[in-house]
Image (cartoon, helix red, strand yellow):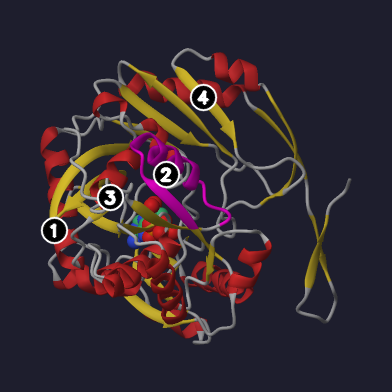
Amino acid sequence: MGHDGRPPHILLLTTNHTYRAPAFLQAAESLGIEVVQAMNMPQALAEEWQMPLGIEFEQVETAVAAITAYARQHPLAAILGVDDSGTLLAAHAAAALGLPHNDPAAALAARDKFVMRRKLREGGVPVPGFRRFATDDDLAAIARQVRYPCVVKPLTLSGSRGVIRANDPDEFVRAAARLRRLLAKLGPGPHPFLVEDFIPGFEVALEGMLDDGRLTLLALFDKPDPLDGPFFEETIYVTPSRLSDDAQTAVADCVAQSARALGLRAGPIHAELRLNEDGPWLIEAAGRSIGGLCSQTLRFDAGASLEELILRQAVGMPLPSTPADAQASGVMMIPIPEAGLLKGVGGMEAAKRTPLVEDVAITARLNYTLTPLPEGESYLGFIFARGETAAAVEAALREAHSKLKFEIAPVIQLHVAGSESSGSWFPV
Ligand code: ADP
């Protein structure tokens, strides 16, 4: 209950393409917390769709004013951004209302990869060498200045969108031009981007919770498929990690140090790291929880979900003790095999019947376009498995995946001669 005896009221900042909202709404219901969703959209559209609140997340000042006006009518206990797009606004609005949250400067550092790299380096966290450029710079000139192999990446996209490895100057120019085309489609340029040293190694993801700056490790996932580029499509995540105890401790210490360097002190943290003979390297730390539907792999004390933990902490409810559940579990983000229209998915029943597999969810819609990385931004679907060991879970995910057959109609690109514009044509 809130101070006035009414259930606490949380504002959830979501987008219309998030995977994360249903899990939060379900968690809120089971905790008796009232949640209102604010979508990233203009107020007029929100009214048309009969949504309680529409705000444009990038227009921080106007959006904070809209949230504070809303909060006068409906007192809020907390504001949460569920995806990267909402974390910065959540911090600003919470600050304006005096609600506990990460400092806006910390939220920015966890949102903008250049600010993040600088703060991490200042805090002594091992990070790849990095330089910032802009899409209107002379790419051939940059190609002569950077070290290889390198990675080009945008500053604020997520899900590996726009992240491309280049092994030599020619590949660099092609990669940077491709990133420039992608960013130009998202808004008027020039756009800043980073060039980083490529860090070889084994990749892991850490899911944790920060409370008054103290990090509690919730899960460490191994990513057993090599992520060597040129694009970095996520596939399998399995927990518990099969790394040595020493390596796991080094990873957790590196994430705690990163949180301090960024100033993140409250709420969920999701970090990606690479490990090699020099130890862990921080690739990215975000002030949000794991993306996609991947949180379904996690269950805490008394069956609590990750979202329940996050909501409880946000409204100051006691957290259940959170030993990772005794079983191994994992998820495969199903790779997009090729660009095109998704026409059908076969083998679902067989895939679901695979021993240890708990669920197979196809989230891409039939007759909609599948766009692979580096341009794409959504998943084909997810396979979930749970079992005694991480090795058995990983094998089950691969087996279930091998039973799925995707029917994809190819896209034929139309290039209009003498013009920058191009269109797509889909055979029916
Ligand atoms: P996003 O926020 O879009 O996920 P990241 O910076 O986390 O972007 O990069 C996505 C993936 O690309 C990482 O998980 C990693 O596999 C790979 N990657 C990014 N930067 C580097 C790097 N400097 N060296 C090696 N791999 C990298």
Task: Give left or right: position of 244 versus 61.
Answer: left
The amino acid sitting under disc 4 is Asp
C-alpha span from label 4 to label 2? 19 Å
Distance from mark 2 CB to nearest ligand 1 atom below 8 Å: no
Residue at numbered disc 3? 274
* Residue furthest to the front: 4
> Can I make out residue 279 in this image?
no
**Crowding at label 4, few (<14), some or many (≥20) Cα neighbours within 10 Å?**
some
Residue at numbered disc 2? 24
32 shown above or below 124 = above
The amino acid sitting under disc 2 is Phe
Task: Give left or right: position of 37 versus 402.
Answer: left
Assess whether residue 31 is covered by the magenta stretch.
yes
Bounds of the magenta segment: 16-37
Residue 391 appears at what percent x and percent y? 34, 22
C-alpha span from label 1 to label 3? 15 Å
Distance from mark 4 CB to nearest ligand 1 atom below 8 Å: no
The amino acid sitting under disc 3 is Arg
Distance from mark 3 CB to nearest ligand 1 atom below 8 Å: yes
Q: Which mark is residue 359?
A: 4
C-alpha span from label 2 to label 1? 28 Å
The secondary structure type at the circle numbered 2 is helix
The amino acid sitting under disc 1 is Gln
